[in-house]
Each structure stands twice: as C-alpha cells, then as structure tokens.
Amino acid sequence: MLVTLLLIAQLATGQKYFSKTGKISFFSQAAMEKIEAQNTSASTVIDASTGAVEWGVLIQGFKFEKSLMQDHFNENYMESSIYPKAKFKGKIDNLTTVNFTKDGLYATTVTGQLDMHGVTKQVTMPVSITVKGGAVSAKSKFVVLLADYKIEVPKLVADNISEKVTIEVIADYQLMNAVP
C-alpha cells in the first residue's frame, strides 16, 4: 500500500494538464442592454507539480448573439486587429490543498498576470478544481473593470455598456506527458 501511494505521488510530480477547448464567456448588464459572448477555443495548461496556470484566447473567437455587437466588440472596444489575444499566466496560491490524484472538489485561488487590450494587471481569482476518475476540470468567475484595461466606452453608449464585466472560465483538462 505504501509503495502504491509513493508511486502515485511520484506520478503527480511533473504532470501537466491541458485543454484546447476551454470556454471563456463574459457578461455585462447595463441600464439599457445585456451583453454576453462566448469563446470555446481557449488553450490552457496546469502544471500539477508547480501550480503554474496559463491560458490564452483569440479575441476574434468570441461569438455574440448579434453580429453587430461582435463587430463593435472587435473593432471599437477590444481592437482585436491590434490586440488579437488575451492571456493569463499565474499560479495556484495554495497548491498543497489540491490533490490531482484524489477525487474531490478543491476550492482555491489563482494569482497572476492578465494581459488584455495591451494592458497587463495582476489579478487574483477564485477557482474550483474538480478531480473525478483521473479527469481534471476547473472553473472560475471574476470581475474586471474596463477602465483597468484601457477599454473606452463612448458617452453616447454609456447606458448600453457596463463599466465592469464578469468573466467565466471553464476547462476540462487532459493529461499530457511532463516535459523534462
């Protein structure tokens, strides 16, 4: 039994989990309008041995209910031709509380650098990591202020666009071989 536990612990060292189908959505509710969009092609990696977390998403991959909103989002607000990608690079704050080899729901936080619209800011976000049958998934929901990322909202449409946006990140990870 002890040998089995030691083997499992050794296997967890250096294990990396990845997804190319992470889901990132955002939502804002202003006085006159609700805006939401989803992107289902975010790339993300978790290194179980160090707690490092990274993800990236192409801005033009966000899909809106109304195509005009999508055009305005890409051209006027996110300027996706200039800033084509949003990225996050951080670490699980209390990695010792997450056991990637044992089924369970692990509540933690991740702190790192969110790079969006040409601005990089440190953020800390709550994350729920679920391990079930060897599969790992993660979910986070946090709020960003548009002004923090120099995303300007013209006064003419201020009642239509909230100053803050709720971002939700969901990923189902697959195990990949550790890179030495």
Image: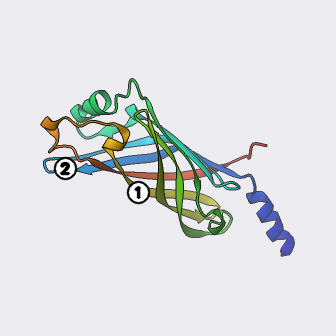
Q: Position of residue 85 (x, y in %)?
A: 45, 33
Q: Is residue 73 above or below residue 179?
A: above
Q: Which residue is painted at 42% across and 29% down in the image?
A: 83
What kind of element bears circle 1?
A: strand
Q: Is residue 6 left or right of residue 52?
A: right
Q: Nearer the viewer, residue 32 or 113?
A: 113
Q: Is residue 43 in view? A: no
Q: Position of residue 40 (x, y in %)?
A: 43, 43
User: Can you tell which quarter of the image residue 12 is in?
Assistant: bottom right
Q: What residue is shown with label 1?
A: 141
The disc at residue 30 is: 2
Q: Is residue 150 above or below residue 136?
A: above
What kind of element bears circle 2?
A: loop
Residue lying at the far top of the rendered structure: 81
What amino acid is labelled 1 in the image?
Answer: Lys
User: Can you tell which quarter of the image residue 129 is in?
Assistant: bottom right
Q: Is residue 155 left or right of residue 15?
A: left
Q: Which residue is painted at 80% across and 70% down in the image?
A: 5
| Quadrant of the rendering where the C terminus is positioned | top right
Task: Answer with mark 2 or mark 1, whichever residue precedes in sequence.
Answer: 2
Q: Is residue 15 in view? A: yes
Q: Nearer the viewer, residue 145 or 55?
A: 145
Q: Which residue is painted at 44% across and 51% down in the image?
A: 169
Q: Which residue is painted at 31% across and 37% down in the image?
A: 151
User: Can you tell which quarter of the image residue 73 is in?
Assistant: top left
The type of colouring in the image is rainbow
Q: Is residue 36 left or right of residue 140?
A: left
